Amino acid sequence: MLRYRQFMGNNHTTLALPCLKTKHTIANSISNDWHALKPSDYTDAYATINTDRGHQVPLASFSNTADWKLTNLLSNITPQSSALNQGPWVRLESAVRNHVGNGNDLYVVTGPLYEYYFAELPQANEAHTIPSGYFKIVMQQTGSTIKASAFIMEQTASRSDNFCNTEVSIDEVESRSGINVMPNLSYNSAQTIESSVYGLRSELGCN
C-alpha cells in the first residue's frame, strides 16, 4: 500500500490514506483568498519556460484506484521543469512504486520548496510563485522500526541526473521547508531517524 501526503506551500492535501498527523489541517491552512491556477495558465509554459504540469502525488501510483481523479486536480500540480519531471523525479516515483510492488507498505511526504526565483507562467494573470525545487520523503515502518530516505531536487536538474545523488536527511528537508514531518515521534526517535540518511537506499535501487 502506498500512502501519500502532499504539501503545497502552506496548504496540504491528503490523497489515499493519511500517513502522518501534521500541525495544520486543510481548513485552517488555506486562506480565504487562496486560488488555484487555471488550466489556461499553463498555455505555452513548455515552449517558453520548459515546464510540464508536474504531479506532486503521481497519477501512475494511483491508477485503477478511487483516488486517481484527484491526482489530476490542479491543486496537485505545479509547473515542474520538464527535465526534472521526466528525469530524476519520475525515476524516484518509479522506484517507490517498485518497492510497493514487492509487497511493502510505504509512506511518502512530498512538496515544493520556494528558495529562489525560477520562472513565471507566461499566460497566468494570477499572482503566483513557481517552486525552486521539490522534496520527497519515503518511509517504511516495520513494527516499531522506521526507515526513511529523503530527497531534494532543484528545478535546474538535468534529465540524466541520478535521484540517488540527491538524498539528504529529513532534518534538512524540515529546515528548508519549515515542515515538521513527524511531530508525533518522541524526541529521541525523531533525532535518530531525521538526522540519518540512506535508510531506504538499497530498497529504492541505490547502491
Image (cartoon, grey):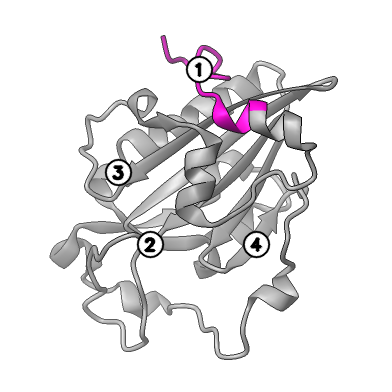
Residue situated in front as seen by the camera: 1 or 132: 132
Q: Give the residues in magenta.
A: 192-207
Q: Distance between the residues labelled 4 and 2?
A: 18 Å
Residue 130 inside the magenta-drawn segment: no
Above or below residue 145? Residue 152 is below
Residue flagged by tag 3: what amino acid is it? Leu
Magenta span: predominant SS is loop
Q: Above or below — where is 16 with respect to 95? A: below
Of callouts 4 and 2, the N-terminal one: 4
Q: Residue at x 34, y 34 (%)?
A: 88
User: Which tag is nearer the camera, tag 4 or tag 1?
Assistant: 1
Sort mark 4 into few (<14), some (14-19) or many (20+) by Cα contacts within 10 Å: some
Drawn side of residue 29 relative to residue 172, left or right = right
- Neighbor class of circle 3 (other Cα within 10 Å; few <14, some 14-19, many 20+) is many
Nearest to the observer: residue 77 or residue 144: 144
**Residue 121 image offset from top left, x and y in percent:** 26, 74
